[in-house]
Image (cartoon, grey):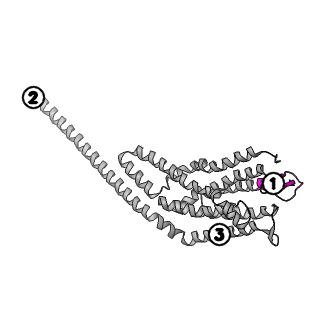
Amino acid sequence: MYRFFGEQSAYSLFNTISMYVPIVVSFIFLKTKTNELGLYSRYAVFYASKKSLYAGTILKYFLACIELLLLTAGTLAITLFNYPFGDIVGTGVNYFGGLFSFSFLGLICSVIIMANPMKQMDIVAPLLPLRLVFLKIACYFNGCCWGIPWEYGPYNHHYDHPGNQVPVQAIEAFWAFSIFVFLLIYRKKAKPGTIYPMYIILYSATRFCSEFFRREENVLWIFKRYHLLCLAGVTIGLVLLFIVKIWGNKIQNLFEKPHKNLDLKIAQYKNQQALKLAEERAQAENERLDRLEKAKLAREKANTRKK
């Protein structure tokens, strides 16, 4: 694992991939998203299904794709918000700027499509560490995020700091991928609204450890600026988990109340359709019996004439 100077093409490649991977991989969660459509989309699918069940199914998947793209765009907050946030805290490009802002963008997108924000963020939260994997690989080839001097095993170089250094980018890419896998497993049994806070906590904790191997200036004893952000990240993640635990059901009921009203309309419509179908079947059965009775009478008359 060496960094070869001049490999900006590899950096550009992985940096570009990091922009599109969340969008592409998000379609793995398409089936989940079709069950968590926003209110307007559900109404559109409901009325389309009245005309044609096939048309309703197609529209459901189409609107699920649109909503996924809208929500996945929130993951790009890592790029849109990290530069000014990094300048404020003095650490350059800062991942936490986008990480924290993603919750606000996810909330806004959820309100726009009238969906439960906790469930929506649960769907796309695993994409955040996946994107981080490719960002860190790009950083590895670029040579940024330099580490402390290192002479053992794999190492890295920095364009302004010659010498072998700890490949913190590769370490963080490994942790990001591990978190991605963990969230995929955790989401199967997780309470709605806990996946995104769990990611903040896991990322902040692993980044807190890897920060000791970065060549950054200490601001408080042995701690760097990013250590303070990591502590803030863990705190925010725990606060979000607390909010979900205490008020999660109320938040869920608030956003899902309109969906329950729609569910009631759908149930009433299905009942009406079932009654209509039952009446049509009963009428068809009565007509069949009438035809049989008429045929029987006709045969009896024919037999009487013959006698």
* Front tag of 2 and 1: 1
| Residue 2 image position (x, y, % from top left) | 83, 47
Q: Is residue 53 above or below residue 115?
A: above
Q: Earlier in the sequence, mark 3 or mark 1?
A: 1
Q: Residue at x 62, y 51 (%)?
A: 22
Q: Are marks 2 and 3 in contact (CB under 8 Å)?
A: no
Where residue 202 appears, x then y in whole percent? 69, 62
Residue 73 visible in this rendered orientation of the protein: yes
- Which disc, if any, is residue 236? 3
- Which residue is tagged 1? 167
Please, which residue is most extreme toward the top here? 306
Find the distance from the CA under tag 3 to the CA under tag 1: 28 Å
Position of 65 compared to 156: left or right? left
Numbered disc 2: secondary structure: helix
Q: Residues within 10 Å of mark 3 (few under 14, many from 20)?
A: some
Q: Position of residue 265 (x, y in %)?
A: 37, 58
Q: Pointer 2: residues within 10 angstroms few (<14), some, or many (20+)?
A: few
Above or below, comparing residue 240 to residue 15 in the picture: below
Residue 307 in sight in this render = no
Dot 3 falls on a residue whose secondary structure is helix
Read off the residue under disc 2: 305
Disc 2 marks which amino acid? Arg
Residue 48 is left or right of residue 307, and the answer is right
| Residue 260 in magenta stretch | no
Give the left or right position of residue 123, taking residue 300 as reference. right
Which callout, 2 or 3, points to the residue nearer the camera?
3
Compare marks 2 and 3 and give the one earlier in the sequence. 3
The residue stretch that appears in magenta: 149-171
The answer for how far apart the CA atoms under marks 2 and 3 are is 96 Å
